[in-house]
Image: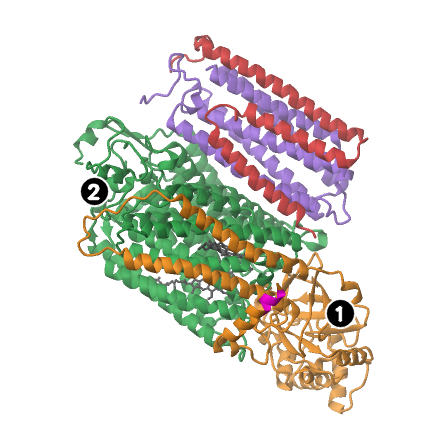
Amino acid sequence: MSHDHSLNPETMPSEPEKATQEGKNKFIGFWFFLGGETVLFAALFGTYIALRNSTADGPTANELFGLELVFIMTILLLTSSLTSVYAMYHLKNNDFKKMQLWLGITAILGFSFLACEIYEFTHYITEFGFTFRSSAFGSAFYALVGFHGGHVTFGMAWLIALMLRNAKRGLNLYNAPKFYVFSLYWHFIDVVWVFIFTVVYLMGKVG
Amino acid sequence: MSTAASQKRGFGTVLWDYLTTVDHKKIAHLYLFGGGFFFLLGGLEALAIRIQLLQPENDFVSAGFYNEILTMHGTTMIFLAAMPLIFAIMNAVVPLQIGARDVAFPFLNSLGFWLFLFGGLLLNCSWFLGGAPDAGWTGYVPLSITSPGHGVDFYVMGLQIAGAGTLIGGINFLATIVTMRAPGMTYMRMPLFSWTTFITSILILFAFPALTVGLFLLMFDRMFGSAFFDVGLGGNAIIWQHLFWIFGHPEVYILILPLFGVFSEVISTFSKKRLFGYTAMVFATILIAFLGFMVWAHHMFAVGLGPVANSIFSLATMAIAVPTGIKIFNWLATMWGGRITINSAMLWTLGFIPTFTIGGMTGVMVASVVADYQYHDSYFVVAHFHYVIVGGTVFGIFAALHYWWPKMFGRVLNEAMGKLTFWTFFIGFHLTFFIQHFLGLMGMPRRYWTYLEGQQLDLGNQISTVGAFFMAFGVIVFVINAIYTAVKGEKAADDPWDGRTLEWSIASPPAHYNFKQMPLVRGLDALWIEKMEGKGRLTPAEPLGDIHMPNSSFLPFMMSLGLFIAGLGFIYQVNYNWAYILLFGGMAIMLGSMLARSLKDDHGYHIPKDELEREVD
Amino acid sequence: MKGWMGKIRAFCLLGLTAFVLSACGKENLTALDPKGYGADQSFNLIILTTIVMLFVLAVVMVVYTIVLIRYRKKKGQKDYIPKQVEGNKTLETVWTVIPIILLLIIAVPTITATFDLADESAASDSLNVQVTGNQYWWHFNYEGQEIQTSQDLYIPVGEKVYLNMKSSDVIHSFWVPAISGKMDVNPENENTMYIEAHEEGVYWGKCAEFCGPSHSLMDFKVVAVSQDEFDQWAQDMQNVDPEAEPEDAVAQEGQSLFQEKNCMSCHAIGSSPAQIGPNLTDFGNRSKLAGVEDLTKENLVQWITDPESIKPGNKMTGNYPEVSDDEAGKIAEYLLQLKPTDITPESAQ
Amino acid sequence: MADNTNSKDVNPFQKQKNKEEMQKQLITFALMIVFTIIAFVVVAAGVMDSMFVIPILLILAVVQVGFQFYYFMHLKDKGHDMPAVMIYGGIWAALLTLAGLGVITWW
Ligand code: HEA
Ligand code: HEA
Ligand SMILES: [Cu+2]
């Protein structure tokens, strides 16, 4: 086995993320982790569903939520999912610069999403006095959406670290799995958001 | 680099070696010592419980202290003793059984261990910092929310950290088994212990997140004034029970399935027969795991969920008896027609069969809803779960240790002491717990600090306490046995039991790279096949070449230490501002270590071919 | 089905050892000698499941014993290699199907009984009692009857009494083994169950859900009396005059001390709904002090001066003004003569 | 390190395959956006009864998530059996959790 994992056109495997044993392990291990995350979010969703009407005379979901902002946030996050797909496309084509570019766009979209979320939370707190402590509904809402936001934040930190660390090295078989696994993570966050906008916001509006 | 050389090195080097090791065999030792330590601690707490209950209206310990002991006994035994000991066996055996040089994530493997250890230490720090948690191992809200002091905060932080370690360990075993099997080792040729490890890891993966969330909610309610369980603000205390048992019931199968694997190996080896109904055994394991997720509310029959929910969960629970029964009968059938050697490992296994069957029987009895209205939260349930946990998990751990000790340490445990341990523990166990079935039905609820005089509960409790001391005696003999073996035990052959699986085809203890050449597996019981065909050793699947090995690292220890410090700070930031120093300091240590890990590429190293050639076979 | 169940039950009762029989003391604590509707149902299932389980255990043990006797390694077998059997379809089917059948035998009566015990259709025209669990005492409010008691629950024998249960703090569980299985008492939802005692008597009740340091001391009693006695009791309780002056002077002093020390801010006498502490209307008739101690003046003085020594973690400690031994004695004198009715636990036994 | 960013050198066959794959991803994305818009419009219009709206929303979400998993995350490709097993396992446990918390918490 070669010690030098760097890629060149002759050695470029079609799936660089799974070309080494370490890469395969990362790939499989990360999918398993996502399986566990599914249950983690299910538990939070379940808690939210159980407590969504426990407003203790505080504001209700219907009073709080505005759809415009949520729509913008959704589009931002969905688009960032697509941009990370583009990044992976260029990874497979062994085009490091383009991959970095698309990852950069992903990061910008991710940060915009976070900004919207922070704005949304401050809006609820200042305008409605709706906090983590207001009611069981409040606790459940901030816990679920906040956990997702925390995942986005962590994803951003991870992405930036990856991009900076590898900026000068280009692609190789050692870091390709890392980029790939990040993209899986990012898609998963999007999946969770799909359920959040459906179950929390849209269903909150419908009642 | 060989083990023999490492024994001659000074204490400091050995210590450093263990602190930084990423070798699954050494991590197995660490888990064994850590889990063993907590087992003794939990056992000591059990003895305190039993002494307190020796007489009616006893006051050996105060009521509040009793509750702390009781909670810590349950929590310690389940999270800090049983599971780590199981991980010890998995780490020691699974890579060898599937013919792998290491686990998929050696670094994470070590991180998992240190997280467990520091989580356990954090939990036990509570004894010295104003009192241990006192809301039961189940930590039911609102009791755990109203519990004064920081006891329950330690429970939350300790379990959260240890739980993260467990989750990491689970994912590691999953990936290892999926990607690292030797050539020819298909899923349906995997030894049963590897199979049960695989299924158990799936259970861990899907069960622990529910606990993680539950603990988070509890922490938010206790520390940040949120209202998940605050009835006044619309909260609901039953959510905790659901989350806890969605985790908690799979957890009990996490505790038993690996040992089912162990018994399968031991029975097959010492009966000199291939496991009867291997395929059925595999599917029974999968079925138990599958059903195990659908039954959690059988812990909540008395909660008042209504007859429909209770009936459904009752049926689902009973269904688990079927795959478990398949296992019991397959073991019996394996022994049938065999040539049974009875030694310590086999004694524990033979003790397990009737004991666990009784425990399972009472399990089905408590699954019958209306009957459970009487059993629930009484000593009958205490008897049930000690029959399955001690009779299954603890017996299994002892069986595994006697069976694999040669592979783990290169020495055979002393047989005479092994038998003494078994008989005293076995007799003591039944003395302690059989009578508790009746105590429960005679009206003794569990988690009772004391009971009143003149309610016919005295005699039963006395017998029970006496039995506990027999068990303690057995455990002490085992500890002496382990020390004696380390000092002057008999050196083990590579294959002391005439084994059937891959781990017996290599040295005891194995070289740090396990297999010089990957073996070619040609069927179930790979080694046995070669023995029967007269070769006695496995054909290599690859030419001798360089072996790639991971580097040791001190970072897992540092990360866990950082989390430990941050955990302390987190608990105390509620009352003291200086605690923020701990909190941020700890976080800095942890994040710094993580940064170091991600900045410094770790490609591992290679053992060159010629060095391997020089080493004698 | 009732028929054969009855037969099996009678058989088993006979068969139960002296050990179990010795447990049927006068305190009516054991679930093995059921004297109420719910306990009967549970007991039937306990017996049924035990029989099935003993059968399974017997099968396992027989095979186990044969295996150990016949197939232990014998002398001269050193090189004997047994036949390596892969499995056996027929056998494996047998031990899959038979357990399923056995489980169905258990499942059907289980589910029938579950629905039976959850049946609340008769609740509206029966006696309803609001049960409140508190750390560490029980409160009973007879709905629509202006009767409040604590610790002792009086019920008419042979009648279904519906209990609507809720907790004021943490989760408790209501358990009277001899007449009924348990039901949790939760803080957020009201749980309903019914109990019915077949015989007059005092039945020992226990809290079965871990609720704090004095969890093991949170006992109560169910006093089952005949319907006539119950009506009499209810009438007496309704007619209580909370302000009635006791006859002897010491008790009178006790009464004024009781007011002075502000005891009434938590406790109540009569049908007032105050529920921070137990209702003391029929305190003198109680079977036990604080659920667990003998009801003597000495013990009561100890309780009043230092409740912590009897029930650790109780909510009275530290929440009332200093009371001297002497004052406590007077208050005790007053409380002990609160006997508004002749229907008492003793009379029930 | 060799100059390895020259994409022209990648095996042209592979490149073509990647490109086709990317086109499919784009279509998937367009569908996801459409589904999202439908979901928001249905709610914003507020004309339908919540009895109908909620199932529609859930179906839209599930299909959309299926796209994410199968196309964006390549669950449809070969070598993804184990990931699929794990995700379905997770979904199974997740559904039970949701059922437990959603249905039998209040009674
Ligand atoms: C290793 C751990 C372990 C295992 C394996 C089991 C196994 C089982 N458990 Fe147990 N259980 C616990 C650990 C375990 N349990 C713990 C710790 C608690 C209490 C937690 C707490 O509250 O603190 C508990 C509590 C508990 C309860 C709640 C009681 C209550 O609180 O009221 C119930 C109720 O249904 C239950 C049922 C079962 C059943 C049906 C099985 C089955 O899996 C058993 C199956 C096995 C057999 C049945 C024997 C072999 C089978 C045959 C020989 C075939 C033929 C059999 C028949 C036809 C019946 N358990
Ligand atoms: C793996 C799990 C496990 C194990 C192995 C055990 C083992 C034992 N357990 Fe327990 N137990 C639980 C899990 C376990 N338990 C749980 C989950 C609960 C419920 C808690 C709750 O309600 O919240 C419980 C509750 C529980 C109770 C009920 C308390 C109550 O409800 O009030 C009792 C009472 O008898 C008991 C007893 C015992 C005994 C005697 C042992 C014995 O088998 C122990 C044998 C071991 C020893 C005796 C160790 C000997 C050690 C020494 C002698 C020390 C030597 C020291 C040095 C060398 C330094 N346990
Ligand atoms: Cu269970």
Q: Residues within 10 Å of mark 1 (few under 14, many from 20)?
A: many
Q: Can residue B574 be seen at all in this image of the molecule?
A: no
Q: Is residue A103 left or right of residue C136?
A: left
Q: Amino acid at mark 2?
A: Ala
Between marks 2 and 1, how big is the CA–CA gap?
78 Å
Q: Is residue D84 left or right of residue D4?
A: right
Which color has been applied to chain B in this rendered view?
green
Reading the image, the residue beneath label 1 is C141
The kind of secondary structure the magenta stretch mainly shows is helix
The magenta stretch is C2-6
Judging by colour alone, the chain drawn in orange in this rendered image is C
User: Which quadrant of the view contains residue B485?
Assistant: bottom left
Reading the image, the residue beneath label 2 is B5
Residue A46 location (% of width, % of height) = 64, 43
In the image, residue B475 sits, relative to residue C22, either above or below, namely above
Tag 2 secondary structure: helix
Tag 1 secondary structure: strand
- Ligand 2 within 8 Å, label 2 CB: no
Which color has been applied to chain D in this rendered view?
red
Residue shown at the point (61%, 63%) measured from the top left: C1
Q: Amino acid at mark 1?
A: Asn
Image quadrant of ligand 2 equals bottom left
Q: Residues within 10 Å of mark 2 (few under 14, many from 20)?
A: few
Labels in figure, total: 2
Q: Can residue A45 be seen at all in this image of the molecule?
A: yes
D18 is within the stretch colored magenta: no
Which color has been applied to chain A in this rendered view?
purple
